[in-house]
Image (cartoon, rainbow, N blue to C red):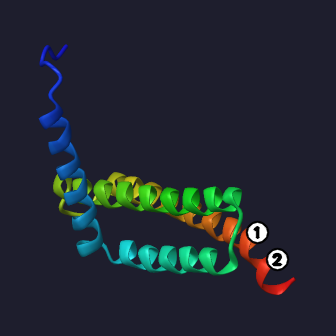
Amino acid sequence: MNNQKFSIIDRIRSFKYAFNGLKLFFISDHNGRVHLVAAIIAIGLSFYLNISDYEWIAILSVISAVFVAEILNSAIEKLADVVSPEYHPKIKVVKDLAAAAVLVAAFLAVAVGAIVFIPKLFL
């Protein structure tokens, strides 16, 4: 058990590390930038179509889910590359599973986007 006292300074520092992680993610991860462009388009379309509060919750939730999945996927890939720089079949399975999580989140985002946007655009 850690007996350190609570420190507001340490909590503020932890935000610095988290924001640095976001910066590194968007600088170094091509898929992260693709997801960012898709998120900007979805948010812009949401404003343009004046979606409801519940639709905003759905759109922002799936955008967040995709980013969380992609960030975790990126972290797992980088760690796996350190653990096993050469090809290893078990590392491949780990990387494929992490990528599958991103795919599931992206499919969900597309489905939610279709449910929210298609009726407003075409009906």
Q: Residue sitting at 52 percent across and 63 percent down?
A: 63
Q: Residue sitting at 68 percent across and 73 percent down?
A: 50
**Which disc is residue 69 wearing?**
none
For disc 2, the neighbor class at 10 Å (few under 14, some 14 to 19, many from 20) is few
Q: From mark 2 to mark 1, how far is it between C-alphas?
A: 7 Å
Q: Amino acid at mark 1?
A: Ile
Residue closest to the eye, 55 or 75: 55
Looking at the image, residue 78 sits to the left or right of residue 53; the answer is left
Where residue 56 appears, as percent x and y from the top left, is 63, 62
Name the residue carrying label 2: 119
Marks 2 and 1 close (CB-CB < 8 Å): yes
Q: Residue sitting at 20 percent across and 37 percent down?
A: 11
Name the residue carrying label 1: 115
Where residue 20 appears, as percent x and y from the top left, is 19, 59
Q: Amino acid at mark 2?
A: Pro
Q: Secondary structure at mark 2?
A: helix
Where residue 75 appears, as percent x and y from the top left, is 29, 56
